[in-house]
Amino acid sequence: MNLPSELAGLLQRYRADPESVFHTWFLGEDRLKAFRTIRRGVMEVVQDIQAGRFPNEFRGSSLEVVMTAVAEQKQVFEGAAHAFYWKPKLRIPDIYENRENQLAFGRALNEALKATDESSLLSVIARLDLAKIKGLGPAVANILYFLHPTIVSPFNTAILRGYNAVMGSQLKLGSWEDYLHMREGVLGINHESGLSKDLGALAGFLFDVGIGKLAVEGNVAQALSFESQKVQKALAKRHEEVAQEAREANEHARMQAHLLKIGRALGYQVWVARNDRSALNCHGGTLGEGCLESLPISHLVPDVRSTVEFIDVLWVDGSRIVCAFEVEKSTSIYSGILRLLDLDLSFQYDGLALYLVAPDARDGEVRAQLARPSFRGLLQRPALIAFSDLERDCEALCRYGQNHEALRKLARIV
């Protein structure tokens, strides 16, 4: 399809706006880190369902871990978990008490994990639709997106509203048929948009149209509302969120720089997350300077290696990882723990020390998350290092520490 000039112009504005979803989410580092960790979480959901240990409640389930990791992506996915909350009065979504429906949901996720092309994935969706599981509709697409981002588009009220405004359609929210109709239109627009093969970029555009941030003829009411005093507050909130993310990114990089400095001082080779190499550090230069260019570990299979390479900081002794650190921000506890779990299950050797580095105020939250059943599989329990302790004792550890055991006096056992 050839894009109308008005739509092409809107896409250009979307791409150029530093506070559009394209910049605040799609190009962000957290999105890249999410794919492997969410995939691993979906695998655990499937295993729990097959083994009969999936609970009759969303809270405390492996599905909650997955959906919280999805919702951590903010903006486009904020509230994505709500569709999976168990509503006892309505008995929806009916995957908690109905074993047959639960098994159908598990089969769909398992087949989606194994799907290799568009045809097989669409067959998965068709079979899930035929199961007619009460209350379980196209919100599942938000999971499938993280398994197949070039085939499945994210989906929520704002995205659908944006699509209807752009295309002049009247598609409905809870219908798989309408979702698939929208997906075909999204693929057509995306082919001409030049944004990305990843459909998240265009979904972000539709989201911004859907909330009225970008005005088109079909969303006059939303656009006018967006300009009202009430929604101006929402725009101010978005602006503050962007600023807060920038502050958190700086703090995150500062903690990584401290860990890299300590690791070098203790005689280890150090690794920084692949997507953080170009970030500026607090000691001058970039985080990637002086770090390993590749991990000297030959036995890692490609999908595990891709996870390990996104762990925030690693200390390496020869061909052995001795310490792994995940530095938490306001939205990364689940995904960070999932990466450590992946590393722990992949290596399974004594002497691997795992650490979560978190703001002082999040001590209780980190402890609560690690108490979840989904994280009981950790062979080595992560210890917690507070930002303030790391900042205060960085120089002392560099000067007086002998090896990684020096961290034990700094860390809090979780």
Image (tube, helix red, strand yellow):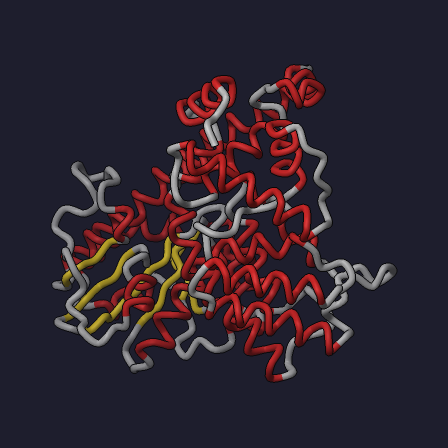
Position of residue 59 relative to residue 377, above or below, is above
Q: Nearer the viewer, residue 404 or 228?
A: 228
Task: Where is residue 373? Give x, y as percent.
Answer: 58, 74
In this rendering, the count of numbered labels is 0
Q: Nearer the viewer, residue 316 or 166?
A: 166
User: Which residue: 43% across, 56% down?
Assistant: 35
Using the rendered image of the protein, determine whether residue 38 is visible from the camera's viewpoint. Answer: yes
Q: Does 228 sit left or right of 337 as displayed?
A: right
User: Which residue: 15% across, 64% down?
Assistant: 268
Which picture quadrant has residue 309? Answer: bottom left
Position of residue 156 relative to residue 10, above or below, is below
User: Which residue: 51% across, 49% down?
Assistant: 361
Task: Where is residue 15? Give x, y as percent.
Answer: 41, 27
User: Which residue: 32% across, 58% down?
Assistant: 311
Position of residue 240 relative to residue 277, above or below, is above
Q: Residue furthest front?
A: 1
Using the rendered image of the protein, determine whether residue 19 is visible from the camera's viewpoint. Answer: no
Task: Where is residue 5? Give x, y as percent.
Answer: 47, 18
